[in-house]
Image: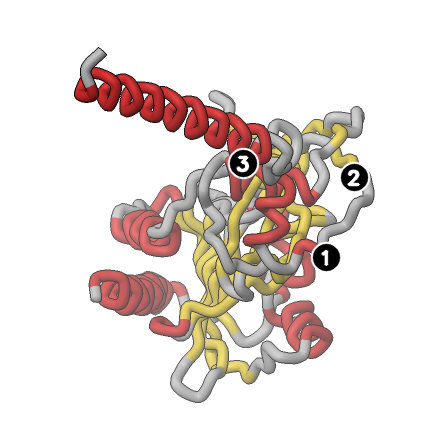
């Protein structure tokens, strides 16, 4: 055998040996990696989201609620006539617009104080809880509550307008009254499960976000043909102290957010006043002679409408920036 052939044979043998050794090394590395435990989805959540320690592990139940719009003219006439320092308009029986004769000072930082104030000056004011302020428009936002608040529902809302000194000048109110109640308590998903779904299913939470509060309330699940609403228990997950995510507390899906809620509601209120006819308007506490009533009622309606238009423009200008 010639030396060249022998050398080629050795090269081939060494090449085969190297391939074998490399293959053994790769198999060993894969074997070692197989023993590294995978990070679970729960561990991923706990690693990336702060504030999970505030979540309650308690099991909650709550009923479904059926509700109808409150009729101010048939159910609240006497109370409206007794409200001091204000003139009011009820449109289509279900929308109350009221303007103070003289501005009323309010301290929103002290709940007991403003609730006492509301008991005097705002129709059933004690059944509304403070949600926040639309700073661009000097408007305080309150949600009606049935033990728990009803979130972002145009039929369960109180908007209080302030002047430059922080005093109340007028308010708009809608109200729901409970109808038939589902006596059966529904089992609710736990707070941890609600946060889990926000992070893994809807991507509403980002790495580094912090859960700062959790509250139970109600959200409109469906509006029925007869005008009745079906309200569903809902988890309000507060994130980073100012953002709110809402999860259906029974089925676990999230509610799409309407970032233009306030603007849309104001447009509806303005249109109501703009298109109102004499037969769907009822005025309270005008306290004028019959000869002056028409003139004063028209002036009151226009003053309230122009104030609402100003609020709308302030909100939409900020949103467009």
* Residues at marks 2 and 1, CA–CA distance in whole angstroms: 18 Å
Q: Residue furthest top?
A: 1
Q: Where is residue 21 shown, x and y percent of the image?
A: 45, 28
Look at 28% across and 49% down and name the residue there: 271
Nearer-the-camera pick, 107 or 121: 107
Q: Nearer the viewer, mark 2 or mark 3?
A: 2
Q: Residue at x 68, y 62 (%)?
A: 126
Are there few (<14), some (14-19), or many (20+) residues within 10 Å of tag 2? some
Q: Quadrant of residue 53?
A: bottom right
Cα distance between the residues tagged 2 and 3: 19 Å
Distance from disc 3 to disc 1, alpha carbons, whole Å, reads 29 Å
Front residue (pair 99, 238): 238
Which mark is drawn over residue 53? 1
Where, quadrant-wise, is the N terminus in this rendering? top left
Q: Secondary structure at mark 2?
A: loop
Is 122 located above or below residue 166 in the figure? above
Mark 3 lies on residue: 220
Q: State the SS at label 1.
A: helix
Residue 288 visible, this angle: no
108 horizontally vs 116: left or right = left
- The secondary structure type at the circle numbered 3 is strand
Residue that carries the numbered disc 2 in the rendered image: 60
Q: Residues within 10 Å of mark 1 (few under 14, many from 20)?
A: few
């Amino acid at each position: 055998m010639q030396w060249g052939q022998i050398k080629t044979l050795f090269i081939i043998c060494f090449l085969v040996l190297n391939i074998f050794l490399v293959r053994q090394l790769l198999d060993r590395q894969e074997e070692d990696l197989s023993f590294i435990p995978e990070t679970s989805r729960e561990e991923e959540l706990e690693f990336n989201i702060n504030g999970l320690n505030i979540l309650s592990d308690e099991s909650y139940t709550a009923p479904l609620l059926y509700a109808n719009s409150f009729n101010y003219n048939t159910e609240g006439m006497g109370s409206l006539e007794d409200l001091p320092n204000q003139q009011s308009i009820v449109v289509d029986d279900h929308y109350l617009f009221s303007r103070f004769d003289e501005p009323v000072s309010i301290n929103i930082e002290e709940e007991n104080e403003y609730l006492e104030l509301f008991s005097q000056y705002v129709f059933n004011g004690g059944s509304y809880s403070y949600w926040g302020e639309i700073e661009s428009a000097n408007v305080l936002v309150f949600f009606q509550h049935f033990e728990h608040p009803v979130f972002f529902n145009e039929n369960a809302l109180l908007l209080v307008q302030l002047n430059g000194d922080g005093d109340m000048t007028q308010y708009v109110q809608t109200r729901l009254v409970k109808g038939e109640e589902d006596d059966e308590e529904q089992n609710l998903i736990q707070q941890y499960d609600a946060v889990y779904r926000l992070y893994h299913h809807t991507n509403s939470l980002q790495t580094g976000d912090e859960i700062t509060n959790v509250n139970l309330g109600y959200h409109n699940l469906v509006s029925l043909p007869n005008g009745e609403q079906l309200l569903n228990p809902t988890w309000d997950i507060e994130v980073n102290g100012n953002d709110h995510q809402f999860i259906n507390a029974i089925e676990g899906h999230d509610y799409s957010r309407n970032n233009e809620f306030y603007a849309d509601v104001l447009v509806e209120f303005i249109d109501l006043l703009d298109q109102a006819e004499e037969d769907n308007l009822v005025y309270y506490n005008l306290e004028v002679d019959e000869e002056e009533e028409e003139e004063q009622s028209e002036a009151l309606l226009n003053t309230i409408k122009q104030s609402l238009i100003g609020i709308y423009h302030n909100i939409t200008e900020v949103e467009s920036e």
